[in-house]
Each structure stands twice: as C-alpha cells, then as structure tokens.
Amino acid sequence: MTAHVMMERAAFPAGAAYGPAVPAEPVAADSAPAARVGLAAGLLLALRFVQARFLSVWGLLVAAALCPPQAFADFAVFSAFVSFVSIAALLRLEAIFFQNSSHERLGRAFRLALATGAGFLGLAALGVVAAVAAGKIAPAVGALFLVSLAGRAILRLVSAEAMAEGDFQAIGNGNVLQALVQPATMLLLIWALGATSLSLFAADAIGHAVTAGYLLWRRRSALIALAAPAFWSLHELVSSAHRWRAAPRLLLPSALLSYGFTVVPLMALPYGSNPMLAAHVALAMRLLEVPTQMFAAVSVPLVLNSLRTQSGVGRQGWVRILTLGLLAGAAVLFAAIAVAAMTADVLLDATQWAGIGEIVAIMALFYGGIALVTPLHEITSLSRHPRRQVATNAVALLAAVLAMLWFDTLSLPLLCVIGLVSLARMLALIQFAWTGLGAEPVPVRVA
C-alpha cells in the first residue's frame, strides 16, 4: 500500500494545470535542505518497508505449507479484487495532497477525499448486501470484503496525508505492524478454523483494519484539525470537486489500468484446466510481490528527492542516468530471483509445490517490468503529456487480454508472453522518460 501511494505521489505534479483549475503556488527556490531532509526520511521509510516485507515472508511461507493450493488461489483473487476496488474509493483525490505545501489546500483536498470515500463505502455496502441477498456471495465473505475494503481505503487516505506532512515514521511503523499482525492472525485462524480460504480472507481484513486503526490514532491530532466540523460546507465540497475534477478524469483511469495489468496473471486463473498450476501461479505472484514492493520502496524516495534538486535542461540528462541505474538494479534483482528459484526448486520435488521454481523464474520477467515501471511513473508524471501513461497502460492491458484469449488456457507459454508484454510496457516508459521529459514544465496560470 505504501509503495503504491509513493508511486502516485508525483502523478499530480505541482505546477501542472488541468482545465480551469488554479495552478499550484511556486515552490521556494532554495529546495536543497528540504531535499536532504526528504531523502533521509524517504530512505528511513524504505528501510522500514523492507523490514516489514521480510517479517511478512515467514507467515506466507508457513501458510503455504499448511493451506491447500486452492485456498491460496482463492485468496489471491480476493486480495486483488479488494485492492482494485480500493483504488477507486477516493477517486484518486489523495494525489492532490502533494500538489504543494499549502495546509489550507491539503485540508480542502482531505475533506473532499474523506467525503468521497465515505460515499463510496456506503455504495459498496449496498452492493454487498444486494449480492448476499441474491445468493451470489456468502455473508461472511461479503462482510470480510467490506472490512478489508474500508481498511485499505483508510490506509490510502491517512498514508497519503502522513506522507504529505512528512510523517514517514508513522507509515513505516504501520508497515511493520501489518507485517506482524496479518501473518500471526493468519496462523491463528488456520489453527482455529482450519486451512480454508475464509481464514486467509479474515486475516487480510484484520491486518488492514488494525493498521488503519493505528494510523488513525497516530495521526489523530492532524486529522481532527483537517476534518474539524467548522470547516465543512457543501459549497466547499462542490467547489473542490469542480476544481480538482482532473484527478478522477485522468489519474483514476491510469491507476486502474496500471493495477489491472499487474494482476493479469490472476485474470488467467479461471481459464486454467490444471488447478495445481493455478495455485502455483497464485503463490508465485504473492512471493514476487515482495521484491517488487521492496524495489519501489527503495527507488521511489531516491527518485523523488533527486529530481527535486534538478531543473531546466539538465534534468533530462539526470533522468537518463537515473533510468540506467534503475534498469540495472531491476535486471540484477529479478535475474537473481529467477536463478535462485530454479536452484531451490529441487528441494520441493516431494511436495505439492513441486515445479513452482520454474513458474517463479518465468514470472520474474513480468514482475521485473512492473518493478521498474513504478519509479518510471514518477519520472514520466513530470512530463507535459500525462495522457501518455494512460495510453501505455491501456495498450499493455489490451495486449495481455488478447494473449489470454489467444491461448485460451493458463499455461507456461502464456506466462512467457505476458512477461514479454510487461517488458514492452517498461521499454515504452523508458523511451518516454529518456526523450520526453525535457525542461521543467512551466505553470499555466488561468484567471
């Protein structure tokens, strides 16, 4: 979650005006001290995130040993669907928090996002009640979906507010807390209720709810100041919604398309005639998400802070250096993962997970492309052409869907093709970052 919020931080850059929106106030020229502070805080957050991911791996591995493969496949679909819906919960209005340092603007954007999220969750609750009444889903699954969705929406809102205010410690502590609570809860529920999909769903919901509660408590003073009843008015909400209508119009489609592409392998699971292969793909995705999120957590703060110190014509040259460094880092990381997975595969020959090493190695191609795209989104969001990201993500998602329709079944060749599409998407963004950034955009002031 935190990596995703950081990835989107620059997607609504200060100084870019969309339609009649009033542009952001100019940033102070002396930004080097702030950049140094931001770099230190960003690196601290990255280290905490890496620590949290390492802590969560043990629970994932233990649960994989205890649960049947089908339970993991069901959980992968449940988690991906809740995460996808949660992206739309705030209509991407949280991206406005980073437009500039104005506390008044942060308050207006926070109240609009809070009202939007509350309305979205209300509609989601009505939809779940209708689905349960129609017998489409079990009541327990519906209730856990709502808890997990609410937890993710609150985390998205409060994490964005904390990051905008520079409270990286709260976000890092929340990551560690979730990495401890969710796996521990998962193991307790497996012991109490059995190794079922419902145990994994409940652990996911509890982990997100507890972390959201911690962040609400940690940021309670700042949140109360932003959402005090005296500041609320219908006129302000309507005015803010009109002013920042570009967020749901441009940023939400890009975010949904991007996330949709990341879960393409899950979309192929229902086409699988081999349940064991589907379960192996689901577990491989969960395992590869860990280094992918780590790469984002480490690279994004560095990219954000280094770009703040660059301006004018020299920025394009610096972007090329950053891109080469990121490309080399991602290539080494995921090549090592592929080799390690193939090497360790022999240890699983007598288990239900035999052969998963080959799948992890193949899917490392897919996730290597996704990992590099995360900081590249930060870079390309500084361009004058924000719609380029939407088009790139849309074409990549369409190509992946067409590949699934062509193969008509989940298979290793299909995973290879999807991996190549991911690389093509990555190369398109590399090309854009290499040539399309140019000088820093000039704010367009509208009377």
Image (spheres, helix red, strand yellow):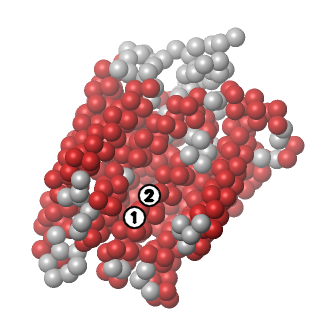
The amino acid type, in three-letter code, at marker 2 is: Ala
Q: Residue 145 carries which label?
A: none
Question: Which residue is at the far right?
Answer: 230
Point out residue 165 in the picture as x, y percentages from the top left corner.
63, 43
Q: Could you tell me which secondary element the residue under label 2 belongs to?
A: helix
Point out residue 183 in the picture as x, y percentages from the top left corner.
45, 74
Q: Nearer the viewer, residue 347 or 91?
A: 91
Q: Name the residue under label 2.
A: 80
- Quarter of the image where one finds residue 238: top right
Q: Could you tell me which secondary element the residue under label 1 belongs to?
A: helix
Q: Name the residue under label 1.
A: 76
Q: Which of 153 and 102 is in front in this view?
A: 153
Q: How many labels does the image show?
A: 2
Q: In this view, does 196 lie above or below 9?
A: below
Q: Which of 399 and 105 is in front in this view?
A: 399
280 left or right of 296? Answer: left
Point out residue 241 in the picture as x, y percentages from the top left corner.
69, 32
Point out residue 97 in the picture as x, y percentages from the top left corner.
62, 38
292 left or right of 41? Answer: left
Q: Is residue 239 above or below residue 82?
A: above
Q: Residue at x 27, y 70 (%)?
A: 275
Q: Residue at x 40, y 64 (%)?
A: 76
Q: Is residue 323 above or below residue 83?
A: above
Q: Do the residues labelled 1 and 2 touch (CB within 8 Å)?
A: yes
